[in-house]
Amino acid sequence: MLAMLRRIFRTGRVAERDPGRPGYGLLSVAGEFSGSVQVRHVDAGSCNGCEVEIGSAFGPVYDAERYGARLVASPRHADALLVTGPVTRNMAEPLRRTYDAVPGPKAVLAVGDCARNCGVFAGAYGVTGAVRDVVPVDLEIEGCPPRPEAIAEGLRRLTGR
């Protein structure tokens, strides 16, 4: 037991350091969330690469929850939508309904190149378009897939922390 405690103290902190408050680019609705935002993730037709990175962003290393962002299971409990992938024909209406179910004030974050501009799926027969073609988008996070740091930074811009 003592050996394990010594190893813990010798290793120190393993998580990323807090980079400080974002002093730039806060979203207009950030003040209304009071530093805490409940996020509903919606996969509109992605390849699951962005989902892996979202899992990393909320994991123990990047720990997006320390910035006040928390994943919730219902859009009725959410303040923001985290949408990944191009919007497929089958997901256009469910995405609109999910957006309508989120109480105001609300925000939408389009995560990944596919959500921003359809990425490699542009012009595919089953794709309706980018997320902004279906619901209004407040913030776009680029990358294919985006790095967990970028996702955490986008959430920080939303919470203001």
Image (spheres, rainbow, N blue to C red):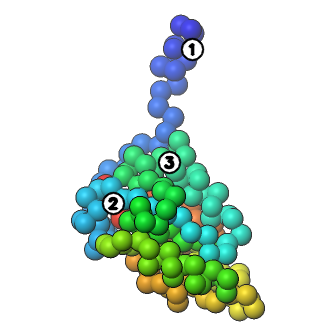
Q: Earlier in the sequence, mark 1 or mark 3?
A: 1
142 vs 125, nearest the viewer:
125
Q: What is the crowding at mark 1: few (fewer than 14 residues within 10 Å), some, or many (at least 20)?
A: few
Up/down of 76 relative to 108, above or below: above
Left or right, residue 143 beside residue 158: right
Alpha-carbon distance for marks 3 and 2? 16 Å
Q: Residue furthest top?
A: 2
Foreground of the two, 88 or 49: 88
Q: Residue drawn 67% across and 83% down? A: 90
Q: Is residue 32 visible?
A: yes
Determine the secondary structure under disc 2.
helix
Which numbered dot is residue 62?
3
- The answer to which quarter of the image holds residue 1 is top right
Of tags 1 and 2, the one toward the viewer is 2
Quarter of the image holding residue 123? bottom right
User: From the viewer's perspective, is 18 left or right of 111?
Assistant: left
Q: Which residue is mark 2?
A: 159
Q: Residue at x 47, y 31 (%)?
A: 13
Q: Are marks 1 and 2 in contact (CB under 8 Å)?
A: no
Q: How many residues crowd mark 2 within 10 Å: few (<14), some (14–19), many (20+)?
A: many
